[in-house]
Amino acid sequence: MNILDVFQNKVFIACMLGWFVAQALKIPTEYLRSRRWLWTMFFAPGGMPSSHSAMMVAGTLAVGLYHGFDNPLFGIAVAITMIVTYDAAGVRRQAGMHAERINLLFEELLKGHMWDENELKEVIGHTPLEVIGGILLGLLVGIAQFMIWK
């Protein structure tokens, strides 16, 4: 087995394309939101669209398209995708909201003290709209790849 064989794995490629395109799209969508070019958004968690959702949906769709929607792997992929998308919009979003409140508390308690270095990450989850954006992007990536690379 050659290490380069992974690049022949169509499901793996769909997952990576879904993630990469979602991360790249965070830069212009952040610009539209804030009117600032933040190139670091490519490496940031959170934001529009959800790269977690895009990656999982693209991979799940690729399993169905390349290996059959009646394949048991498709069923497992759907279940894992549901968990990941729920977690992206639910648990991780709540953790981000808690971090936001804790950072505000520190700011209020320590007026004037620089706290940036140890601040908790506030954008670690996604809004439901960001997850839907990731799901739609994942579907587009999966379908486009299948149309190009059957």
Image (spheres, rainbow, N blue to C red):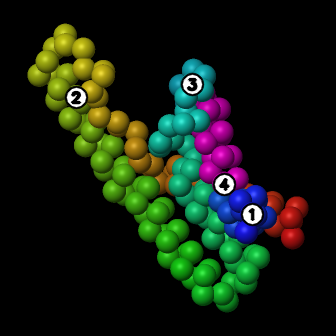
| Left or right of 123 in this view: 64 | right
**Upstream in sequence: badge 1 or badge 3:** 1
Q: Amino acid at mark 2?
A: Leu
**Upstream in sequence: badge 1 or badge 2:** 1
The reply to whether dot 1 and dot 2 touch (C-beta < 8 Å) is no
Residue 38: mark? 3
Boundaries of the magenta span: 16-32
The reply to whether dot 1 and dot 3 touch (C-beta < 8 Å) is no
Please name the residue shown 68% across and 75% down the image.
63
For disc 2, the marked residue is 104
- What secondary structure is marked by label 1? loop
Which percent across, then down, holds residue 27? 62, 32
For disc 4, the marked residue is 16
Q: Amino acid at mark 3?
A: Leu
Image quadrant for the C terminus? bottom right
Which quadrant of the view contains residue 104? top left
Observer-nearest residue: 139 or 121?
121
Which quadrant of the view contains residue 26? top right
For disc 1, the marked residue is 2
Q: CA distance from mark 1 to mark 3?
A: 38 Å
Q: Amino acid at mark 1?
A: Asn
Label 3 neighbour load within 10 Å: few <14, some 14-19, many 20+: some
Residue 142 in sight here:
no
**Upstream in sequence: badge 4 or badge 2:** 4
**Upstream in sequence: badge 3 or badge 2:** 3
Determine if the magenta segment contains residue 27.
yes
